[in-house]
Amino acid sequence: MTFEALVTLVNGYAWGPAMLVLLLGTGMYLSMRLGFLTLRKIPTAFSLLFGGFSGQGQGDIAPFKALMTSLSATIGTGNIAGVATAVAIGGPGAIFWMWVTALFGMATKYAEGVLAVRYREQDALGGYSGGPMYYIRNGLSKKWRPLATAFAIFGAMAGFGLANTVQSNSVAQVLDANLGIPWQATGAVLMVLVGAVILGGIKRIAATAGAVVPAMAIAYIAMSLLVILMNLSEVPAALGTIVSAAFNGASAAGGFAGATVWAALRFGVARGIFSNEAGLGSAPIAHAAAQTNEPVEQGMIAMLGTFIDTLIVCTMTGLVIVLTGVFETGESGAALTSMAFAQSIPGGEWVVTVGVLLFAITTMIGWSFYGERCVVYLVGTRGILPFRLLWVAAIPVGAGLNLGVVWLIADTLNAFMAIPNLIALLLLSPVVISLSREYFARERR
């Protein structure tokens, strides 16, 4: 059995029916227990994001920058290449299941944000550390601590797959296809750019994310809206195709091989989680560094990450692909999205080229902090510098890897991270519910 075949086999089990039930089930359970608070409080969350906090608290970075750091890690090539891969394999129906994953995933992300602030700690250098490993250790009994260690190990490893090598690989592919730039040159430049930011720690990461993420997201959404407006009369039919294919599958047309309902569900959920990371346990590591003493407020900020990432940015990509019909060509990944934009806008492929470049860089920057905090949990602050150096050194290596294997490994590591985190969220759900009720009761007075 080849290595790729082995990874494919493991990935099939990791993202089998049990994982889909656990992911969606956790989000559905939390949504219902919270009275669908995450949907009702979206306006409140946006008001908090833009200055409505009850007051400053302890932490390393502003709540807005905590979200931008989180979004810098989540808005990546998954929004461009990941959505395209899901549609290419699972058909247009995959987009519908990405929506479903996001709607329930908002409750998962909310719970992660609440617990991250509630159970965070300060390390030996005064920095704030939080996330699943800490809310497992500090919120559950000792018998659950192996889950915390498992998450930290998988978290430290996973970043090298889904946020380091995958990102540099996607950039190398796009630049080689559009400009003929060799992957070696791309890897070297990315290594310098990312290294200059992450060696400065969380404050430099947050400052960079706070400046770059809003600008790049707005620019990408604007270009996507332009394509959608150019095909406005076709939007109702495109939405109908997405919903229909989610429950009936997609028939073959052109170079498209057709897709089953299971393929749409499996790849829609997997790519949705890859993109917004709800349930993965990564985002709460960033939210734990926020300057706030209100776990619920940061939880509401956290859930906006899923809303913005999937329900807005991924939807833009998906609609552009379906409206232009390029998913029937047999192309996949970033090349498919590039083809969709190029078909509608002269030079439209540059939207994807620039988008992939910026999204990938910010993802590598944000995820470096996640991996670093996992290492701090495992070995203390002495592991920070070695991790940062190893992270930077891995970037050019990833640029030359086979994309198919890289995506498979990233998907598998996603699952291995999610399992300990989802178990902890279910066990600690009474804490989330209690803190939420207490906060909103206090706010109504």
Image (cartoon, grey):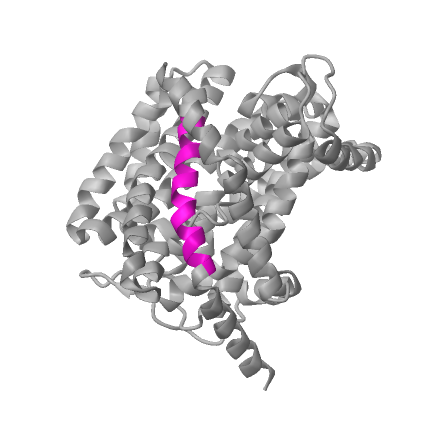
Residue 416 placement (x, y as % from top left): 39, 40
Q: Nearer the viewer, residue 350 or 48?
A: 48
Residue 84 placement (x, y as % from top left): 59, 28
Where does the C terminus fall, quadrant-wise? bottom right
Q: Please tell me whether the stretch drawn in magenta is mainly helix, strand or loop.
A: helix
Is 379 placed left or right of 154 in the picture? Answer: left
Observer able to see residue 304: no
Is 240 placed left or right of 262 in the picture? Answer: right
Highlighted range, magenta:
406-426
Quadrant in which residue 362 is drawn: top left
Residue at 24% in and 53% down = 377
Q: Nearer the viewer, residue 2 or 106?
A: 2
Q: Is residue 9 above or below residue 103?
A: above
Residue at 52% in and 45% down = 276
In the picture as drawn, the residue positioned furthest to the bottom comes out as 445
Quadrant in which residue 397 is drawn: top left
Where does the N terminus fall, quadrant-wise? top left
